[in-house]
Image: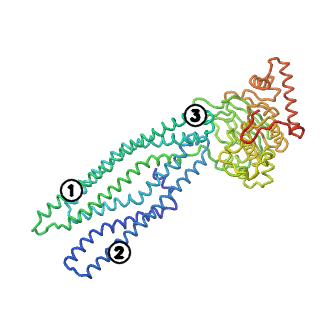
């Protein structure tokens, strides 16, 4: 764990070394000052001249000034080192997460990742600052002060030596009790963050269902549980202070008692014990005890941050399940896709496969529709194409080559995916669109938006393409968000375009316009359209029916209507089939004719009279 965390120190090694060095010099001067003062008082008593007083006073002032200077510099370097270390930790965690595969991300919750990058890193930052400064100061001061006490009176030095293991045993017992509690505390932190994040993200749903009281109660339970565990841990850590106070006053009393005894008993002997020696012992005893108290504070902080360190190391040591091959292929020849005996499950420990025995061959430039019930693994199937997950068995080929042979970035640049959950980031529309191509010109942005049927509503905004999108795209409707995400994908100029139910919030007319644009302007791009709405895949070259992770049928509209029960049921239910084959056939013909009319309107007929999906503040599903 220490080795993993130490890698994040990097450019702050100098400050991390200078701080303890300067602290050591500060402590040495602090420990020499009492000894020097004793000598000074003795000499001035023997020769009480002004010159002696000025010389000794000047030397004492210089020693104190240098001690102060070393302490200030040590504090400065400790602050720089700890803040820089925390900065590097956040950087390393964030970059590590960016390299995670979907399988890695599934392992950690979003709230847990947020807690690790905030609360956990802050705990480690505080602990590191105390380690490079106080943790070095305490043992150095204790060792030097102990050496001084032995040089003055070894019998008195033994008293302080006995103190150290007693205190160490007490701190060890506290550690063993507290460590498991902090393990639970940070899991509760994750739960608390998750509750807050979920509530804020879904605040519209909470208010529409009048569930504020329920959410408050849920938050209150989580917060109370966290408070209870933290209080329990702090109670145990609170024993640290009374143990220190007991040792402090116990040793002080022993020094005063035994020192007084030695003074009285040695009076008149050849080696009498002087009052100055006892005073020095008390000063050094105070330094030993204060160093132990500081060390106990460091100990408490380290105990608290230990669980944070483990959690951060979990992220830093997590290896992505996806890796580039030794000699990756950087060029995707075309958009052909082949599934050969593919089976897939999300976890090695899963009892059954999500996809089973998938054999599928898609020619470059084809438009493929995919339908199936909820949980039929439609999204899982297309996730394998861009290698968001690796297959468990078999292989997936794009452009005639196994996806595992490609450079991941090169493959994903040629396989554009508009995911089921559309995400826009805070920034202007232009900035969001340029996620597809950061070097795209304004003309290319407009062209992509026209193909995605997004240009019209963008032009209606006062700032047009410079309109600011709020975090998560909350200031645009669902259909507008979907079309912006489609435009963003088109800017990649991919060889394979995957739409994962990405037109569900637009009306059928706009949907037809988008598909018409695909046919006319990107005919060589392979289009895969996942949809719940039959009209969205009606004019596909082939339609794939998935059921329970298996391919239930593949064919054209006419073929599937004749041969596939699942497709027929979905088709006729959406066009209100009568159950009579002749009537249903007539309905099918009428539906196709309606579709043709919709496409004709897309060419300029009566498109202006067509229903519109998006209005400000809402969306329409047809």
Name the element at disc 1.
helix
**Tags 1 and 3 touching, CB below 8 Å:** no
Give the labeled residue for mark 1.
253
* Above or below 34: residue 50: below
User: At 67% across and 48% down in the image, what residue appears?
Assistant: 470
User: At 60% across and 36% down in the image, what residue appears?
Assistant: 206
| Dot placed on the residue nearer the N-terminal end, 2 or 3 | 2
Residue at the far top in the pictured view: 580
Q: CA distance from mark 2 to mark 1?
A: 33 Å
Which label sits in the foreground, 2 or 3? 3
How many C-alpha atoms fall within 10 Å of the one at disc 3: few (<14), some, or many (≥20)?
A: few
Using the image, tell me which numbered label, if any, was put on residue 62: 2
Residue 413 lies left or right of residue 190; in this view the side is right
Q: 372 or 459: nearer the eye?
A: 459
Which label sits in the foreground, 1 or 3? 3
Residue 138 lies left or right of residue 438; in this view the side is left
* Above or below 245: residue 478: above
Which image quadrant is residue 509 in?
A: top right
Q: CA distance from mark 1 to mark 3?
A: 63 Å
How many C-alpha atoms fall within 10 Å of the one at disc 1: few (<14), some, or many (≥20)?
A: few
Q: Position of residue 210 (x, y in %)?
A: 59, 33
Using the image, tell me which numbered label, if any, was put on residue 280: none
Q: 180 or 509: nearer the eye?
A: 509
Residue 8 lies left or right of residue 488; in this view the side is left
Give the labeled residue for mark 3.
211
Q: CA distance from mark 2 to mark 3?
A: 68 Å
Q: Position of residue 587 (x, y in %)?
A: 84, 23
| Dot placed on the residue nearer the N-terminal end, 1 or 3 | 3
């Amino acid at each position: 764990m220490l080795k993993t965390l130490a890698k994040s120190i990097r450019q702050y090694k100098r400050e991390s070394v200078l701080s303890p060095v300067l602290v050591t010099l500060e402590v040495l001067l602090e420990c020499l000052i009492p000894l020097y003062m004793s000598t000074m008082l003795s000499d001035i008593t023997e020769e009480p001249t002004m010159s002696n007083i000025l010389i000794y006073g000047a030397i004492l002032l210089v020693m104190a000034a240098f001690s102060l200077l070393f302490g200030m510099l040590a504090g400065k370097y400790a602050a720089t080192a700890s803040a820089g270390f925390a900065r590097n930790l956040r950087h390393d965690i964030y970059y590590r997460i960016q390299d995670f595969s979907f399988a890695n991300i599934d392992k950690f919750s979003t709230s847990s990742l947020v807690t690790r990058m905030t609360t956990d890193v802050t705990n480690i930052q505080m602990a590191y600052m105390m380690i490079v400064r106080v943790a070095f100061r305490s043992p150095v001061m204790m060792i030097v002060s102990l050496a001084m006490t032995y040089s003055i009176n070894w019998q008195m030095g033994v008293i302080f030596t006995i103190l150290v293991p007693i205190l160490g045993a007490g701190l060890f017992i506290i550690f063993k009790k507290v460590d498991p509690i902090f393990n639970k505390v940070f899991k509760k932190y994750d739960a608390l963050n998750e509750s807050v994040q979920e509530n804020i993200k879904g605040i519209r749903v909470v208010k529409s269902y009048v569930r504020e009281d329920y959410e408050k109660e849920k938050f209150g339970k989580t917060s109370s549980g966290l408070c209870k565990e933290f209080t329990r841990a702090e109670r145990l850590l609170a024993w640290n202070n009374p143990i220190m106070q007991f040792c402090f006053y116990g040793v002080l009393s022993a020094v005063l008692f035994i020192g007084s005894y030695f003074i009285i008993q040695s009076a008149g002997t050849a080696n009498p014990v002087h009052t100055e020696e006892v005073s020095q012992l008390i000063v050094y005893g105070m330094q030993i005890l204060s160093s132990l108290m500081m060390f106990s504070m460091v100990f408490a902080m380290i105990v608290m941050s230990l669980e944070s360190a483990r959690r951060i190391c979990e992220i830093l040591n997590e290896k992505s399940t996806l890796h580039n091959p030794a000699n990756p292929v950087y060029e995707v020849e075309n958009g052909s896709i082949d599934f050969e005996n593919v089976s897939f499950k999300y976890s090695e420990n899963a009892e059954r496969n999500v996809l089973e025995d998938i054999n599928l061959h898609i020619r470059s430039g084809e438009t493929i529709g995919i339908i199936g019930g909820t949980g039929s693994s439609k999204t899982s199937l297309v996730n394998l194409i861009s290698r968001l997950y690796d297959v468990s068995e078999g292989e997936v080929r794009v452009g005639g080559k196994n996806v595992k042979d490609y450079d991941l970035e090169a493959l994903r640049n040629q396989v554009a995916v508009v995911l089921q959950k559309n995400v826009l980031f805070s920034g202007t529309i232009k900035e969001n669109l340029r996620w597809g191509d950061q070097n795209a010109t304004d003309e290319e942005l407009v062209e992509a938006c026209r193909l995605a049927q997004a240009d019209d509503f963008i032009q209606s905004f006062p700032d047009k393409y410079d309109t600011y999108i709020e975090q998560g795209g909350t200031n645009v409707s669902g259909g507008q968000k979907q079309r912006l995400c489609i435009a963003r994908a088109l800017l990649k100029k991919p060889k394979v375009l995957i739409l994962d139910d990405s037109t569900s919030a637009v009306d059928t007319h706009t949907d037809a316009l988008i598909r018409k644009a695909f046919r006319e302007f990107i005919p060589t791009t392979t289009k895969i359209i996942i949809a719940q709405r039959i009209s969205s895949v009606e004019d596909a070259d082939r339609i794939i029916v998935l059921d329970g992770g298996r391919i239930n049928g593949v064919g054209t509209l006419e073929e599937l209507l004749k041969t596939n029960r699942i497709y027929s049921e979905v088709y006729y239910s959406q066009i209100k089939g009568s159950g009579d084959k002749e009537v249903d056939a007539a309905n099918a013909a009428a539906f196709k004719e309606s579709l043709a009319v919709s496409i004709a309107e897309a060419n300029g007929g009566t498109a202006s009279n067509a229903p519109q999906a998006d209005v400000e503040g809402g969306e329409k599903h047809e």
